[in-house]
Image (cartoon, grey):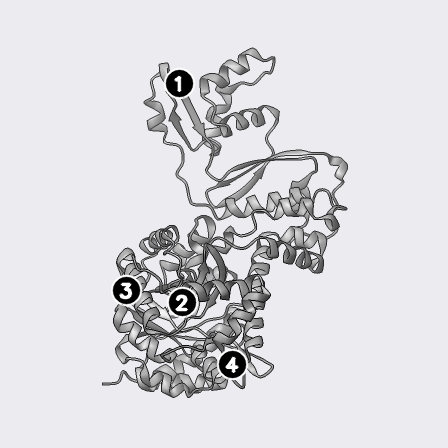
Amino acid sequence: MSTPPPELIELQGLFYDAIATKDPYSIQQLKPQMRSTDNLSFEQGLSAYQGSVVGKLVRALEDIYPVCCRLVGTQFFTAMIRQYIRRNPSSSPDLGDYGEQLPDFIAQFKPAATLPYLPDVAHLEWHWHRVFNSADQPSLDLTALGKVPPKHWPDLVFQLPSNSVLLTSDYPVHRIWQVNQANTSHSETVELSEGGVNLFLWRDQYETRIDLPNASEWKLLQAFADRDRFGEICARLEDSSEDINVAAMLPQWVQRGWIRGFTLDR
Amino acid sequence: MVDLTAIQGAGIGLRSQHYAHILTHQPAIPWLEALSDNYLGGGLPLHHLEQIRAHYPMTLHGVSLSLGSADPLNMDYLTRLKQLADRIEPVHVSDHLAWVSVNGHYFNDLAPLPYTESVLKYVANRIAQVQDFLGRRILIENLSPYLQFRHNSLTEWEFLATLLVEADCDLLLDINNVYVNATNHGFNPLDYLEAIPRDRVKEIHLAGYEEQDNFLFDTHGYPVQSGVWQLYQHALQRFGPIPTLIEWDTDIPSFDVLMAEAQQAETYLCQHHRPN
């Protein structure tokens, strides 16, 4: 391990605050430590960095949230995310990690309140982006599953694809998302009266999918997402009046790719 | 038969806009450089990268190692980079002589270092740690800073030349950055080239800058400018026909435009032989 020179720690702290947060005190402290030239003054250099840092974050969010941008218009979107960027510094070397809190920010952003579905569309876009870029995952090891003795079946905990997500919205957000893709014609409209949806986002090999599970599938997906033991799930279904045929659904899900692994919770 | 383990000639920076064109037409481009930060996850981007890698020599170029940061090295990032490098088997792995993070906050932009002896020792040590972890030599790239520290005790080229030896790493020489810096900070770019040890330069970058007021801004969104082409020829004279890359990061043009730029570089490369 190498220890940074003390002056480096101090200078980098000042530099960051002067550029990322535009802190007046840091700018004042930094200025005498920097050298201006005839072609490039301290103020121009500072401004170049300030613009570049924000510009990179703006472009990252435009890439992750294109539908939100389309729904509110570029001007509104840019003004909104500039406020978000001021309050939310980046904490990852990967720009793809930036912007996770934007859906919650939009929900609190009063000028966007006229579009009540916008935070849910943003949630959908964020998770789409994460699923699209997530690490590859092998399919279920059927041989290993076959070796689990029947007496341990109640202890099985089935795993959904990693980075898959269950989303619920009071609005038909999947349709809003669909008709606002860059390659879709503007003529299609979505009626909010179409109602809410339950969505399952996951990746089938290299294809990112938004599926609409039926009520039975949704219940089972939730149980798997909560990592409930298979025995508990079956007991719960037996006690309820719902007609959910788990024995028939499981092989379908394995084939479809919705179940990717299992553990034994003994 | 293409040798996928070495690069030569003039290559192009791989951008997602051109995946389909490259996979469909397999254009005659000698090599490609991928931005490592775009492939640290998985899915379709990595799948495309692997498909393209099967046909072209490739290098990996990143922006987030934060080699000069006072923060500890980000081992999670480094681990992901190693996994990618092990999978892609690039000819070179490179990043910048810069820092992008402090106190756990990221600029996601390349910030300059003070050029002093103590910083040099610190950065050399960090580069050595990175090379040990990756199990390979890396290339570091000179950047185009818009602010310079008053208390620098070394010029950028003195700092860089010593660092290459101290850290025992190689150089990705960005000619556009040398030109932009020379104009913005008022020095002779030939002095810069003269100071760089010949045997350390393994790759050259060329890109286009933008004029803003009375200074140059390194946007990578324009064709290579005439002054940069001229400086490139000086560099080839000194270092020989070093593999050269056309970098274009904003307002990405059609593949043909990049090919034309690469062909221009190839023409200059063919006029030079490795110096004795």
To the question of a shared chain for discs 2 and 1, the answer is yes
Nearer the viewer's eye, disc 1 or disc 3? 3
Q: Position of residue A177 (x, y in %)?
A: 65, 46
Q: Which residue is mark 1?
A: A153
SS assignment at label 3 = loop
Mark sitting on residue B137? 3
- Residue A241 versus residue A21 in the image, above or below: above
Residue A239 showing in the rendered view = yes
| Residue A102 x/y as whole percent | 61, 48
Location of mark 4 (residue)? A36
Looking at marks 4 and 1 on the same chain, the residue that comes earlier in the sequence is marked by 4
Quadrant of the image containing the N terminus of chain B? bottom left
**Kind of residue sitting beneath label 4:** Ser
Which type of secondary structure does the marked residue at label 2 adopt? helix
Q: Chain of mark 2?
A: A
Q: Nearer the viewer, mark 3 or mark 4?
A: 4
Picture disc at residue A7: 2
Q: Quadrant of residue A44?
A: bottom right
Q: Chain of mark 4?
A: A
Contact between marks 3 and 2 (CB within 8 A): the answer is no
* Tag 1 and tag 3 share a subunit: no
